[in-house]
Image (spheres, helix red, strand yellow):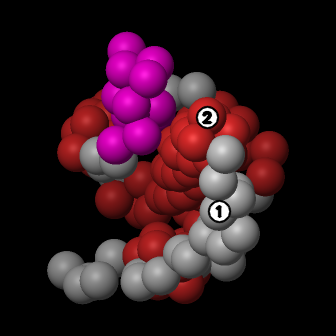
Amino acid sequence: SHIPGGPHLEALACTADPAAVLQYRNRIAMPLRTDKESCNFSFSGIKTSVAALVAAEGKRLGDSTEELDKVKPAIAAALQDVCVRFLQERTERALARCRDDAAQLGDAMVSSLVVAGGVAANKAV
């Protein structure tokens, strides 16, 4: 087990063949898709989606660890892509709300956004 997982995921994703990533990108569910108004973040559903994808690929590949190891970089890159798009979507939504609130109150718009912690260390973010 590699804790924290982010740096390991990023390193694995960097080795992926971009063409291979495309076949997995749409097989990983974007989290909280039914909640069109929320700015909340949750990655529990996406982790379940990836676990199911890895299990399905393992079965498709005849439970060959060697073959599964070949597709893991593409799955990691697809996961990273979905996570970045999710973060971007929710952040843009939150900033739009800040803009609307500032306009209604006659206040200045937020001038800074701080992204911190382990997620912020990811180069794709």
> Count the marks: how many?
2
Q: Which residue is mark 1?
A: 110
Which residue is outermost to the right?
Answer: 19
**Proximity of marks 2 and 1: CB atoms separated by less than 8 Å:** no
Q: Is residue 42 above or below residue 4?
A: above
106 or 3: nearer the viewer: 106
Left or right of 40? Residue 120 is: right
Judge the density around disc 2: few (<14), some (14-19), many (≥20) Cα neighbours within 10 Å. few
Could you say which quadrant of the image residue 25 lies in? top right
Percent from the top left, x then y, of residue 92?
Answer: 64, 44
Judge the density around disc 1: few (<14), some (14-19), many (≥20) Cα neighbours within 10 Å. few
Q: Residue at x 34, y 59 (%)?
A: 65
Q: Is residue 16 above or below residue 38?
A: below
Left or right of 14? Residue 118 is: left
Name the kind of residue labelled 2 in the image: Gln
Percent from the top left, x then y, of residue 76?
Answer: 51, 58
Left or right of 56? Residue 71 is: right
Left or right of 49? Residue 69 is: right
Name the kind of residue labelled 1 in the image: Val
Q: Which residues are magenta?
A: 28-40
- Residue 96 appearing in the image: no
Which mark identifies residue 104? Answer: 2
- Residue 111 appearing in the image: yes
Which mark identifies residue 99? Answer: none
Determine the secondary structure under disc 1. Answer: loop
Q: Residue at x 71, y 69 (%)?
A: 111
Q: Residue at x 46, y 74 (%)?
A: 119
Percent from the top left, x then y, of residue 90?
Answer: 52, 42
Determine the secondary structure under disc 2. Answer: helix
Q: Mark 2 or mark 1: which comes first in sequence?
A: 2
